[in-house]
């Protein structure tokens, strides 16, 4: 299943995923990733190499806004299709809905709380 066997690592990943929903870097990356047409209109490059560079740059924005969420798969299991589907749905909601950033921040608060609870449980046992 490729799941983390370390409860401490799992707790810290959940906490990190929650914290990462709040900084300006996340908002900047999400803003660029939400509007691919705007990106193409402002960052257009001619030719094959230009297209490759545009794709790499835009892809880096999309990875930049979601990489910590994808790291959560190590907590539940990389091969757990239910968790993969749930995270994919969350990322879709965050990117497509008009108030998606607010959804992400609320989820970040929930993830931070869950991470702290998990850390507290690990610390006390």
Image (tube, grey):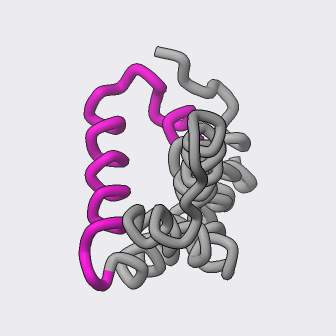
Depth check, front residue: 19 or 9:
19
Can residue 31 be seen in this snapshot?
yes
Q: Residue at x 58, y 64 (%)?
A: 43
Residue 44 in the magenta stretch? The answer is no
Residue 14 appears at what percent x and percent y?
58, 54
Q: Height in image: 25 above or below 82?
A: below
Rendered image quadrant of residue 120: bottom right
Lateral position of residue 102 relative to residue 9, left or right: left
Residue 72 appears at what percent x and percent y?
53, 43
Number of on-image labels: 0
For the stretch drawn in magenta, the main secondary structure is helix
Rendered image quadrant of residue 38: bottom left
Residue 94 in the magenta stretch? The answer is yes
Q: Height in image: 119 above or below 104?
A: above
Rendered image quadrant of residue 124: bottom right
Q: Height in image: 78 above or below 110?
A: above
Q: Which residues are magenta?
A: 71-99
Lateral position of residue 1 relative to residue 10, left or right: left
Q: Residue at x 42, y 79 (%)?
A: 101
Depth check, front residue: 93 or 48:
48
């Amino acid at each position: 299943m490729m799941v983390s066997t370390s409860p401490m690592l799992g707790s810290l990943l959940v906490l990190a995923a929650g914290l990462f929903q709040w900084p300006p870097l996340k908002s900047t990356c999400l803003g660029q990733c939400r509007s691919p047409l705007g990106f193409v209109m402002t960052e257009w490059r001619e030719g094959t190499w230009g297209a490759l560079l545009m794709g790499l740059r835009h892809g880096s924005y999309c990875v930049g806004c979601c990489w910590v969420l994808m790291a959560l798969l190590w907590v539940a299991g990389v091969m757990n299709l239910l968790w993969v589907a749930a995270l994919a749905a969350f990322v879709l909601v965050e990117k497509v809905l008009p108030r998606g950033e607010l959804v992400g921040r609320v989820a970040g608060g929930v993830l931070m709380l869950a991470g702290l609870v998990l850390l507290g449980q690990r610390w006390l046992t």
